[in-house]
């Protein structure tokens, strides 16, 4: 009887592990990507990648994770089954962040030192376009239908809207100082842009390219200059927005309909970027200065625990 119970327990544990998601966390200081099992939150593997890894995304088929190796001027490609770097794709100078088109064929890369968005075919690595934008491009986001992309430029304080068919700039939207991340709302009618030094979130109409509202942040006991909006994510139902507030060590919760801040969640030091679990129940936050990720329970909006990773974690990608 005990033997049968032992076999059953082993089977259940193996099944749980097989169903667990994998988190890929880029560690800027260590030149590594830490892979975590979402069930145990223990490291599966630490992958050596190029120098100063920051932006990290997963292909729609979940077969590859793409990592911006900024100081190597390259995108490293990680096989999500073997956890090995299978190739390194050369780019323009200092790829800071990338986003993958909804159909998974191309990536748009913010090449910070060249003031360019480069467009690369993922399969071949061929450069299809180089789009001049403002100084120090950082964030990239696609509209849900893939027809437009938004890029932010830190030193120009603009969000640039790009036609993904013609590769032409069709709008330049002035926002507050040092914009970092951009993200379309799930319905595609608006996109959000965070301004790190300006301390605001701009909500921009995707049809008129006009700012419909600027959201500010106030946290009792925290100096305003420490409130530095960075990464953005939306809840699975699209009703809440999550904004990482950098040196304020908080995640702001915003009601998408009213665009009002409803809560702040204390996390580790200097949260950068975040990612939702596949079921939308957990939000994983990369904390750059405490070298860990904070796990937030989305239904209760509570920080559950923090898990150590490498030094200066920056971004997260998830394989279901």
Image: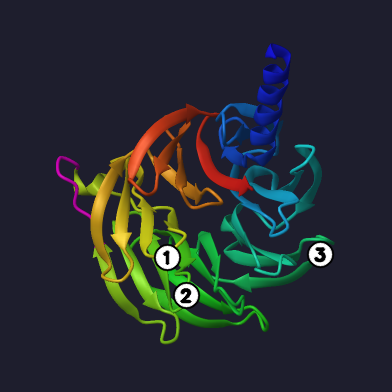
The part of the chain drawn in magenta is: 216-222
How many C-alpha atoms fall within 10 Å of the one at disc 3: few (<14), some, or many (≥20)? some
> Can you give x and y, in whole percent of width and height, for residue 302 in the image?
33, 41
- Apparent side of residue 104 relative to residue 250 in the rendered image (left or right): right
Foreground label between 2 and 3: 2
For label 3, the SS is loop
> Can you give x and y, in whole percent of width and height, for residue 308 in the image?
50, 27
Which residue lies under the disc numbered 3?
Answer: 126
Q: Is residue 182 above or below residue 53?
A: below
Q: Which tag, 1 or 2, sits closer to the chain's start?
A: 2
Quick one: 80 or 215, which is closer to the camera? 80
Q: Residue furthest left?
A: 220
Could you tell me if residue 137 is visible in this image? yes
Q: Residue furthest top?
A: 2
Q: Which mark is residue 238?
A: 1
Q: Is residue 270 above or below residue 61?
A: above
Which residue lies under the disc numbered 2?
Answer: 187
**Residue 41 location, quadrant:** top right
Q: Is residue 197 above or below residue 249?
A: below
Measured in 3D between alpha carbons, the distance from the residue under mark 1 to the one under mark 2, in whole angstroms, is: 8 Å
For label 1, the SS is loop
> Can you give x and y, in whole percent of width and height, for residue 112 in the image?
57, 57
Instruction: Give me the residue at 73% from left, 21% from top.
Output: 7
Instruction: Give me the residue at 52% from left, 37% from top.
Output: 313
Q: Which tag, 2 or 3, sits closer to the chain's start?
A: 3
Contact (Cβ within 8 Å) of mark 1 with mark 2: yes
Quick one: 206 or 284, which is closer to the camera? 284
Foreground label between 1 and 3: 1
Chief SS of the magenta region: loop
**Which quadrant, please, contains the N terminus?**
top right
Quick one: 9 or 170, which is closer to the camera? 9
């Amino acid at each position: 009887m005990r033997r049968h119970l032992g076999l059953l327990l082993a089977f259940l544990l193996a099944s749980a592990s097989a169903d667990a998601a994998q988190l890929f966390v880029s560690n800027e200081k260590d030149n590594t990507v830490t892979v975590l099992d979402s069930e145990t939150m223990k490291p599966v593997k630490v992958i050596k990648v190029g120098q100063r890894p920051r932006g990290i995304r997963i292909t729609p088929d979940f077969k590859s994770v793409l990592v911006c190796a900024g100081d190597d001027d390259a995108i490293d490609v990680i096989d999500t089954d073997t956890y090995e770097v299978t190739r390194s794709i050369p780019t323009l100078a200092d790829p800071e962040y990338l986003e993958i088109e909804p159909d998974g064929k191309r990536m748009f890369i913010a090449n910070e030192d060249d003031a360019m968005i480069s467009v690369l075919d993922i399969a071949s690595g061929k450069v299809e376009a180089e789009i001049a934008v403002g100084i120090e491009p950082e964030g990239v986001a696609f509209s849900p239908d893939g027809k437009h992309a938004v890029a932010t430029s830190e030193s120009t304080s603009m969000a640039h809207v790009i036609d993904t068919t013609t590769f032409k700039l069709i709008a330049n939207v002035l926002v507050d100082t040092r914009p970092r991340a951009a993200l379309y709302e799930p319905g595609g009618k608006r996109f959000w842009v965070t301004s790190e030094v300006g301390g605001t979130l701009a909500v921009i109409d995707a049809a008129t390219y006009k700012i419909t509202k600027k959201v500010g942040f106030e946290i009792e006991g925290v100096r305003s200059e420490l409130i530095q909006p960075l990464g953005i994510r939306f809840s699975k139902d699209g009703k809440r927005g999550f904004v990482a507030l950098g040196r304020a060590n908080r995640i702001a919760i915003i009601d998408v309909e009213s665009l009002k801040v409803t809560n702040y969640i204390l996390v580790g030091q200097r949260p950068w970027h975040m990612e939702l679990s596949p079921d939308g129940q957990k939000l994983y936050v990369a904390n750059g200065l405490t070298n860990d990720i904070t796990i937030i329970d989305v239904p209760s909006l509570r920080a559950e625990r923090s898990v150590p990773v490498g030094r200066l974690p920056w971004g997260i990608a998830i394989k279901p």
